[in-house]
Image (cartoon, grey):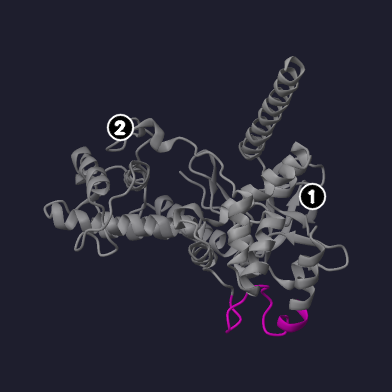
Amino acid sequence: MPNRNVSIYRKVLTPEQTIRYCRVIMRGKDPHPKKVEFRGLIFEADEGDYYLAYRNPRQKWEHVGGDPKAAKFAADKKRAELASIATGREDVPQELGQRGIRISLQDACDLYLKEIRCTRADDTVDLFNQTLTEFTKWMAKEYPSVRLINEIRRSHMLAYYQILKQQGLSKRHGEHRILPCSPSTAAKKTDRVNQWIRKTLGLRAGQGPVKRSDFPAECFAQEEVQAFTEDELNRFFAACNDEEHLLFSLFLNTGMRNKEMQYLTWDDIDFESGLITICNKPELGFNVKTLGSARCVPITDDELFQRLADREKKKKKASDFVFATRTGGRIRDFLDRAKKVGERAGIPREKVWIHKFRATAATGLALAGLGFTGVQQLLGHRDPKVTRRYLAKAQDIQLRDQIKAIRQQSKQRLQLVKRAHA
C-alpha cells in the first residue's frame, strides 16, 4: 500500500559542490523559492528543478519542473491520488499513463497539456498545443469514427506525416491549404503526437504507433550550428532603428538566450562591474534552462554599455524590464522583430533567428582566442558536448582561413619562381 506522505525536494548544487536532492523548506503551506535543507544544513539555492518524493510502494522521484507553485500543485495532486488508492476508493480520476485508459482525443489533449505545463518550458507547451490541436481537428475531419486516443493507429500517423509533407495544414487545420512542411518539420510534429499517445496510454519508448526509424534519419539529426557572416551583420545592423540596434547588439555581445533577454531586468545589470547576472526569477515565473545556465555575463562593448546606462536613466521608472512594452510588461516578439529587420536588410526570413546571434557570439569569441571553458561559461552550457557544437563552427572557419592563407602563399611563391625563370 502506498504511503500518503509526499515531500518536495530540489536537485541543487550544495555548499560541498555536489549535486544532491535537498528538501525544500516550506513557508507556511508554500515551498520557499530558495531555501533548502541537506543533512541538517539550511542554505539558499538560486537554481534547480523540483521533485516529488514518495513511496508507491517503493521510493519514487517525480520531476515536476522549476516552478515552486507548480511543485505545490503537483504535490497536492499526488497526495490526493495516494490517499484515494490507500482507502480503496473507486473514484480516482483517470491519469496519464494508466493502462487501458479510455479517453476522448480532446480530453486526452487537455489532460496532457495541463500536466506538461508543470514540467516543460512555455515555448515547448505552445509547440505541443499547436501540434495536438492541429492533429485532433485533422483526425475529426479525415477519420470521424476515431474518437478515443487508444483507437489511433499507425496508418493514421503516417497519413498525417504525408499530408504535412505534401500539402501542409494551415492554422485553420485543413480548411485552407498552404505550403507543405519540410520532411524534418513533418517528422517532428508526428513525433510530438506520438509522445502524447505514449504518455497518455502508459507506453514505453518504441511502443507508440510509430517509431523514429519510420522517418528519414536526417529528420532527427542534430542541426549544424549556424552563425551570421560579417556582411549579413553589417547589413542587419544598418537596417535597425535605435531600439532594435541596442537589443540585437546586446544579443550579439552577451550570447543570451531569447527568454533570458525577455526577463532581463535593470536589477540584473551591475553598472559598476559591467556584468549581467542571469538567474532564476521565481516571482516572475522564469527559471534558467539548466543548472549551468545561471551565470554572470560581461558587457565588453563600451559603447553598448553607455547606451544601456543612458536607457536606464530614461526607462527604469517605467518598468523593471530592460525591454518593456508601453504598459510595462516584457516584450515577447524578439523573433518577429529580427525577421522584419532581416527583410529590410535583404536577408531571407528563414536565415534570421534569435539563437543565431548566440552562435555568432560564441564563434567570434572562439576565433578571438577564448578557450573552451570560457565559451562554455559564457553560454551557460552544462553539457560540454553542446559547447563543442558551437566551437565546431569556429574550427571550420579557422580551417578555411588557414587553407586560404596556404594557397595564397603558394600562389606568391609560384609567381616568384616564374619571375626568377623569366
Using the image, determine if residue 111 lies above or below residue 17.
below
Q: Amino acid at mark 2?
A: Asp
User: Viewer-nearest of labels 2 and 1?
Assistant: 2
Q: What secondary structure is marked by label 2?
A: helix
Instruction: Tell me, yes or no, if residue 307 can be seen here.
Output: yes
Using the image, determine if residue 298 lies above or below residue 186.
below
- In front here: 354 or 242? 242
Q: Position of residue 366 (x, y in %)?
A: 73, 41
Side of 258 where 252 appears, left or right = right
**Residue at far left of view:** 145
Q: Amino acid at mark 1?
A: Gly
Q: Residue at x 57, y 53 (%)?
A: 355
Q: Main secondary structure of the magenta part?
A: loop
- In front here: 25 or 299? 299
Q: Which residues are magenta?
A: 312-329
Given contact means CB atoms under 8 Å apart, are the residues at marks 2 and 1 in contact? Answer: no
- Earlier sequence position, callout 2 versus callout 1: 1
Q: What secondary structure is marked by label 1?
A: loop
- In front here: 334 or 267? 334
Q: Residues within 10 Å of mark 2 (few under 14, many from 20)?
A: few
- Please check the rendered image and state whether residue 406 is part of the magenta-colored stretch, yes or no: no
- Please check the rendered image and state whether residue 318 is part of the magenta-colored stretch, yes or no: yes
Q: Which residue is mark 2?
A: 214
Q: Position of residue 422 (x, y in %)?
A: 72, 17
Q: Position of residue 212 (x, y in %)?
A: 36, 34
Which label number is shown at residue 40? 1
Side of 209 where 372 appears, left or right = right
